[in-house]
Image (cartoon, rainbow, N blue to C red):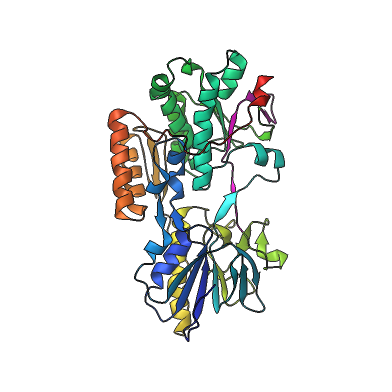
Amino acid sequence: MNIPKTSFPRIVIIGGGFAGISIAKKLKNKEVQVVLLDKHNYHNFQPLLYQVSTGGLEPDSIAYPIRKVLKGYTNFFFRLANVEEIKTEENIIVSNIGTLEYDYLVIATGSETNYYGNREIEINSMAMKTIPESLNLRSLILENFEQALLTDKYHERDALMNFVIVGAGPTGVELAGALAEIKKGILPKDYPDLDTRRVQIHLIQSGERILKEMSEKASQKAEDFLESLGVQIWKNTRVTGYDGKTVTTDTEATFETATLVWAAGVKGVVIKGLNAKDLLLGGSRLSVNQYSQVIGYDNIFAVGDVACMQSTETPKGHPMMAQPAMQQGRNLGENLVRLLEDKPLKPFVYKDKGSMATIGRNKAVVDMNNIRFQGVFAWFVWMFVHLFFLIGFRNRMVVFVNWVYNYIRFDREARLIIRPFNRNYSAFKD
């Protein structure tokens, strides 16, 4: 990897997400050598990926170069790499660009879409966890309408204009709201020769309510907002299969669609090498103690979505969201400095700052401790919070200007098929 030797302890961070970046900032100008590895050269602001998918924002508005984040940091090195294995006994990581020794290792690899072992759904559905996946979804949405123009069969056309979203967490709810607004304000202008009133948006949730991690009041209000936009919500319904054309469920309901978006769950990205089975919870998260140390290792830590810190208050670990990842990263960054200074470590205490979700124009729900509000004010709070946590002044300004423009013009300018998804539409000729 061409990393210079040093007399300072070497800390290797795998992953440049919310947790990894937070650790790096805490280690700025300390007497350590920090090597940050990631398979992308940018930090991705995942909460706004759905706006890339629906043409509200371009991807460079929510991405920021990792090297620019580390600019001016002494003894910091970034390498574009995919880490494949950890040799714990030798304190070595193995990647596609070579090997590297470490004194301390931090696993901040984040999460990926969880298909729960359903290979058919994994092959045929669309995910939305990365920028490339969001661009694929944007292209597919637009290509479906272009294809709908080319057929005079109502059944085929309806399938091309139907959308099924599986999972009614914040991602699914926000995507459903965005698609509903596109149906209302944009599709009639772009496709005057299509009857876009026939566009259907289905949101499927296996549980009894949507946004189950939020309060019941927020859940009910979000449901009301979605139904007012024309979204059809199916609760207590579990999707069992999707062959690229027909969605099957554990009820009598089936759906004909060219677009199934899977937002039903995530799992941690675990790297080969931590062999003890009791370290993995459900095969997807690493068990860590209150100091973020991976159980059984003194010099290996895990933070963010890939880490599960169990306690009486959090038997399933902390939510796999941005806030816990950033807070764990800051805490671990401080603890690594304390460790090198032979000071006692500080246990991690999560400060829940609340949850929020937007359901489109002037519609959002916010839970902040014991304060809960919905509607226009919640929508402004949602926008302010997301702008605040974006990295880089330019990104904040670009996103803000786009939102203002979209609000005034009721438009989404990024409706571009930059790279075709090339879906096989032969199944819809049946």
Let me know if residue 349 appears in the view.
no
Let me know if residue 299 appears in the view.
yes
Q: Nearer the viewer, residue 288 or 209?
A: 288
Residue 102 on the magenta segment: no
Residue 266 image position (x, y, % from top left): 58, 49
* Quadrant of residue 31 within the rendered picture: bottom left
Residue 127 image position (x, y, % from top left): 57, 42
Which quarter of the figure is the N terminus placed in?
A: bottom right
* Quadrant of residue 378 within the rendered picture: top left
Q: What stretch of residues is rendered in magenta?
A: 246-269
The residue under the point 43% across, 23% down is 187
Residue 256 on the magenta segment: yes
The residue under the point 46% across, 84% down is 8
Residue 148 in the figure: left or right of residue 183: right
The residue under the point 44% across, 60% down is 326
Residue 196 position (above or below residue 23):
above
Residue 408 in the figure: left or right of residue 128: left
Residue 69 image position (x, y, % from top left): 38, 63
